[in-house]
Amino acid sequence: MIDTIVLTINSGMYTILDHDKFSPSTKGIFNPENGYYRLGGRANMTCKQNPTPNELRAGIYKPRLTVTKRMTRNGTFETPLKIEFSVPKLIFGNNFDELTDEDFITVINKLKAVLRDMGVYVYETALVNAPVSSVHFSKNIPLTDYTTPYTYLDQLSKLNINKRLDTNKTDYRNEGHSFKYRANSFEIVFYDKIKDLSQAKNSEKRAEEKDNALQLNIFGLAEQKYPFEVLRIEIRLNKRQKINQILGKIDKKVEPTFANLFKQETAKAVLLHFIKEVEDAYPPLLTYRYNSPKKLFTELLASNPCIKLTTALKFLGFRILLEELGVREFREVIKRFGNSAWYALDKETKLVSRGKDTNAFSLLRKNITEFQPLKLSNFKGKMINSDKQD
């Protein structure tokens, strides 16, 4: 469903009840006699209000608010209010528990009440129909079969999607327990949810998420003697233009407002769209499980009856190296032969029949397609039957 979202409330659709809750005070924006700081040629001023660490540790969650006074292209001023918040954290105090379409009115009422406590009154219709400038679609995938997120992250880390998805940077954190593909307008993030919270206990900067002090202890149950791990995927669309582009690709051409995006079907479609893009960039040879050169070779021959022996041997060596190095390191090793060598080899392997469905993608597709909302309470105090072990 949706995790983090950024709403923009236009001038006239909200009222500041307590200017001094912002830093600096919004008096300088709304009361001309107080004056305001001129920052740059367009005379912008920004006032913020964020939750404090003490509030988060006490279990109090609040959105991050920004009021900006800026000059428009026609020379007039506007004062939009930006509201950034994690929807599940607002309702549940954590973002493991997941919401459904039926929770939307609850979210609006809660958000309106919290904003009022923060000294801001926003009309309900303004919240419902607020334009969205950034949205993170996410899914938590529980692992209760004695596997760990690293098992799947290791497979996904062998991808080569930078060119396909126009990403320009790949980040790895926490010894391979988190990585993301980044572009200017979006990010694809996979990470170990419990490991991320563990890192946040040491330093918020080392974690993928903001405001983790609110939920540092929600996975105390993980210390019990049964398997419980969480693999998390997030698709972060960070610009309104990108949101519109993706809505078009999934055949949901609607105005990106809070009400229109708060749909399980929309979240599912966005997540499945990116999973397909990622899987299509997955080298076909990596879909063959690597247990031994012998098993890999025999399966390769069986799945490709028309393959030549020399080609099969070449692909065998290529697959073994990919298993050990991954795509990026392999390309670094062969860079002296030029980029054309890699692209020729990659194109040739695209003709190979895919092996059995990889665990990573079958797991992701299954959970996203079913799209069952997860609740932390469902996993407390429940032993996993030992006959489910692999």
Image: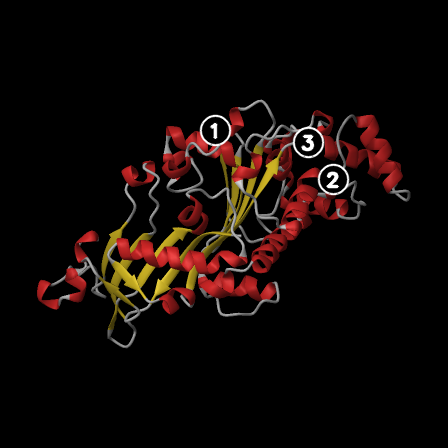
The residue indicated by pointer 3 is 323
The reply to whether the C-beta atoms of the residues labelled 3 and 1 are less than 8 Å apart is no
At numbered mark 3, what does the secondary structure look like: helix, strand or loop? helix
- Give the CA separation, mark 3 to mark 2: 11 Å
The residue most toward the right is 305
Query: Residue at position x 49%, y 31% from top?
Result: 195
The residue indicated by pointer 2 is 287
Q: Nearer the viewer, residue 370 or 178?
A: 370
Query: Residue at position x 26%, y 66% from top?
Result: 79
Query: Residue at position x 56%, y 61% from top?
Result: 246
The residue most toward the left is 33
Q: Residue 368's spot in the image, x, y percent?
A: 63, 49
At numbered mark 2, what does the secondary structure look like: helix, strand or loop? helix
Left or right, 39 with reference to 87: left
Task: Please give the label number shown on residue 220.
Answer: 1
The reply to whether the C-beta atoms of the residues labelled 2 and 1 are less than 8 Å apart is no
Density class for disc 1 (Cα within 10 Å; few <14, some 14-19, many ≥20) is: few
- Give the CA separation, mark 3 to mark 1: 35 Å
Q: Residue 99's spot in the image, x, y percent?
A: 51, 51
Q: Nearer the viewer, residue 256 or 89?
A: 89
Q: Nearer the viewer, mark 3 or mark 2?
A: 2
Density class for disc 2 (Cα within 10 Å; few <14, some 14-19, many ≥20) is: some
Task: Please give the label number shown on residue 246.
Answer: none
Amino acid type of the residue that numbered disc 3 sits on in the rendered structure? Glu
Amino acid type of the residue that numbered disc 2 sits on in the rendered structure? Thr
Left or right, 388 with reference to 330: right
Q: Looking at the image, is mark 3 or mark 2 earlier in the sequence? A: 2
- Give the CA separation, mark 2 to mark 1: 35 Å
